[in-house]
Image (spheres, rainbow, N blue to C red):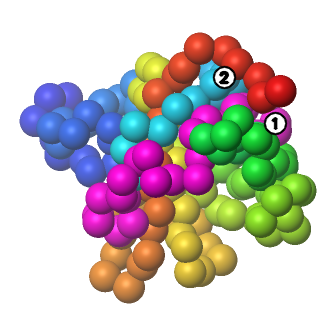
Amino acid sequence: MRGEKNHNTLGGDGDVNFHAMRCPTAETLTGNWVPVAADVSGRQLVVKELRVARLIIERDSYQIVDHSDQVVDSGELHLDEGAFPCALDIVGSHGPHAGKRMLAIIELDGDRLCVCYDLERDERPASMQPQVDQLLLSITYVRGAAARPA
């Protein structure tokens, strides 16, 4: 269905990417992810200044590795494969997000993963596009080579 416009896809050209609209499985999320773009409510961030150098996902758990190759945050992931947009709960167990649940939405298109959550509210975003009163953090990752922190 070319020509339809949807800002909830990774396509960038506005055309609906029906592959990206399907929710990934825990197996397809498993991997080593490297950030390539980030913004807060449309304001671009410098990727090299992000704390996260790598995001490691292993089915239902995650680790955030910083630029000095240290695990600085870790916890559990709870994926709702039936939701649209695809819902991911990020539950911190170690680091600055310990004891917190972040309600995110995600899009996976091949080896590109976009994770988006509200920085101020305890509610899941309805889309990747922020409303006027929302402060959404969106980070786009690409799948990298498998690596584990020391």
Residue 107 located within the stretch drawn in magenta: no
At 66% from the left and 49% from the top, the residue drawn is: 88
- Report the magenta residues as a range: 39-62
Tell me: residue 32, above or below residue 137.
Answer: above
Residue under label 1? 60
Residue that extends furthest to the bottom in the rendered view of this protein: 133
Place of residue 78 in the rendered image (x, y in percent of width and height, measured from the top left)? 77, 46
Closest to the observer, 81 or 92: 92
Place of residue 31 in the rendered image (x, y in percent of width and height, measured from the top left)? 66, 22
Residue under label 2? 31
In which quadrant of the rendered image does the C terminus lie?
top right
Nearer to us: label 2 or label 1:
2
Q: Quadrant of residue 37?
A: top left
Residue 61 located within the stretch drawn in magenta: yes
Q: Amino acid at mark 1?
A: Asp
Place of residue 105 in the rendered image (x, y in percent of width and height, measured from the top left)? 55, 52
Tell me: residue 30, above or below residue 80.
Answer: above
Closest to the observer, 60 or 54: 54
**Local secondary structure at mark 2:** strand
**Can residue 144 be seen from the camera position used here?**
yes
Q: Is residue 22 left or right of residue 121?
A: left
At 35% from the left and 68% from the top, the residue drawn is: 41
**Local secondary structure at mark 1:** loop
Residue that extends furthest to the top in the rendered view of this protein: 145
**Can residue 26 be seen from the camera position used here?**
no
Tell me: residue 132, above or below residue 59.
Answer: below
Residue that extends furthest to the front in the rendered view of this protein: 68
For disc 2, the neighbor class at 10 Å (few under 14, some 14 to 19, many from 20) is many
Who comes first in sequence, dot 2 or dot 1?
Answer: 2
